[in-house]
Image (cartoon, rainbow, N blue to C red):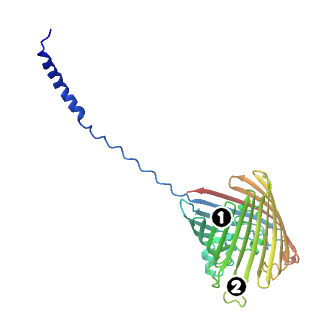
């Protein structure tokens, strides 16, 4: 049997061995290594800038063998002609970037003709190559634009590739303005309704000619994806400040576009204008049939009454009939083959022998290349 005196000694030895372990267990753990710093979130990409442009050329043959009348940009007989060359940069404002802009450079016959009514000769040279240039600011549902802007009147536009026909209607070129300089507010009520108002110098004048201002109001309704209805009204004094008579000019415009089927689209425009005793009005009806993705045919008929004052230089009543074959050759490049007959209710059109006739038949081949991209 072991000695009882050896037990306490053994206990003391075990306790002495255990004490360092217990002391170590009571010490606080070393501080944890700091977590690596989170990498900064990537900054949002700046909004993209849209870039686009087009080149528009044509050959026109007038059976009367003279330069055609009542045309906007297709104005030369029996000549290969550059109608327009255009280069644009723009950025549409959005909730992420409320500032935007649009700058559109413009060359060719179309540039000269759209600026031909500019009241200042210096203004014609300065501004004719700027189709539009304006700044934009988005505030909630309202977009503000300030600068030179193409006119919202009518259904046709300056860019031929965006129209159903190659030539523009007489109403577009002679009864409606091309551009305005001033301020515009556009309020998007909802996906189906948009309101717009403008305060501008007037019709086709960046350089003010009378100190008065012209106002414009517009309503756009899109009840469904296939139907769009636009109503415009523009009111103001347009005559120069030193003119003997300075009546208020008023132009009411309404146009409707309806995609009847995936292949058939219809459009109609009606304008009524007055300036004192001078009055003019016109209607234009369009139909476009997209037979296959690369080919469509479009027809247009217009009736004009300019018998009360000759605002459109007709001094009578006129009709035009247009049929256009639209061929998409490759992406961005399209050819337009067009026959058009202009008719006035009196001998109006010049022939090469100096005589006047009531009809003007023309055949046109137009070639347009357009491109878009982003920077």
Q: Where does the image place residue 299, in percent across and percent down from the top left?
A: 82, 61
Left or right of 180 on screen, residue 28: left
Left or right of 30 on screen, residue 339: right
The image quadrant that residue 69 belongs to is: bottom right
Residue pictured at 57% horizontal, 65% vertical: 138
The number of numbered badges drawn on the structure is 2
Q: Which residue is mark 1?
A: 189
Q: Which residue is mark 2?
A: 239
The image quadrant that residue 116 belongs to is: bottom right
Does 135 appear above or below 29?
below
Q: Earlier in the sequence, mark 2 or mark 1?
A: 1
Q: Quadrant of the N terminus?
A: top left
Left or right of 375 on screen, residue 352: right
Mark 1, other Cα within 10 Å: few <14 / some 14–19 / many ≥20: few
Does residue 132 show up?
yes
Q: Where does the image place residue 359, in percent across and percent down from the top left?
A: 87, 72
Mark 2, other Cα within 10 Å: few <14 / some 14–19 / many ≥20: some
Q: Nearer the viewer, mark 2 or mark 1?
A: 1
The image quadrant that residue 212 belongs to is: bottom right
Which of these two is toward me, 184 or 85? 184
Are the residues flagged by discs 2 and 1 in contact, CB closer than 8 Å? no
SS at badge 2: loop
Which of these two is toward me, 16 or 347? 16
């Amino acid at each position: 049997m072991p000695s009882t005196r050896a037990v306490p000694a053994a206990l003391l030895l075990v306790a002495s061995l255990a004490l360092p372990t217990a002391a170590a267990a009571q010490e606080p753990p070393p501080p944890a290594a700091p977590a690596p710093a989170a990498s900064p979130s990537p900054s949002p990409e700046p909004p993209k800038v849209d870039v686009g442009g087009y080149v528009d050329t044509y050959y026109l043959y007038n059976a009367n063998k003279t330069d055609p009348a009542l045309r906007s940009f297709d104005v030369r007989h029996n000549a290969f002609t550059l109608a327009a060359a255009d280069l644009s940069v723009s950025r549409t404002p959005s909730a992420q970037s409320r500032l935007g802009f649009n700058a559109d450079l413009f060359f060719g016959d179309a540039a000269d003709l759209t600026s031909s009514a500019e009241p200042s000769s210096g203004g014609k040279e300065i501004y004719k190559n700027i189709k539009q240039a304006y700044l934009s600011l988005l505030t909630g549902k309202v977009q503000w634009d300030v600068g030179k802007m193409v006119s919202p009147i009518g259904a046709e536009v300056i860019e031929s590739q965006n129209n159903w026909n190659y030539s523009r209607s007489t109403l577009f070129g002679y009864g409606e303005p091309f551009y305005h300089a001033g301020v515009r507010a556009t309020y998007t009520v909802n996906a189906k309704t948009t309101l717009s108002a403008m305060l501008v110098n007037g019709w086709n004048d960046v350089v003010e000619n009378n100190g008065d201002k012209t106002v414009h109001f517009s309503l756009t309704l899109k009840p469904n994806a296939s139907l769009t209805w636009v109503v415009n009204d523009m009111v103001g004094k347009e005559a120069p400040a030193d003119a003997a008579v300075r009546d208020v000019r008023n132009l009411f415009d309404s146009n409707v576009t309806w995609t009847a089927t995936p292949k058939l689209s219809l459009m109609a425009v009606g304008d009524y204008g007055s300036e004192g005793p001078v009055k003019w009005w016109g209607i234009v009806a369009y139909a476009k049939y997209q037979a296959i993705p690369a080919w469509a045919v479009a027809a247009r008929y217009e009736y004009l009454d300019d018998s009360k004052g000759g605002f459109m230089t007709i001094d009578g009543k006129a009709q035009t009939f247009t049929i256009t074959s639209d061929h998409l050759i490759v992406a961005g490049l399209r050819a337009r083959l067009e026959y058009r007959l202009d008719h006035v209710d009196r001998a109006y059109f010049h022939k090469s022998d100096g005589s006047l006739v009531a009809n003007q038949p023309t055949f046109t081949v137009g070639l347009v290349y357009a491109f878009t991209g982003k920077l």
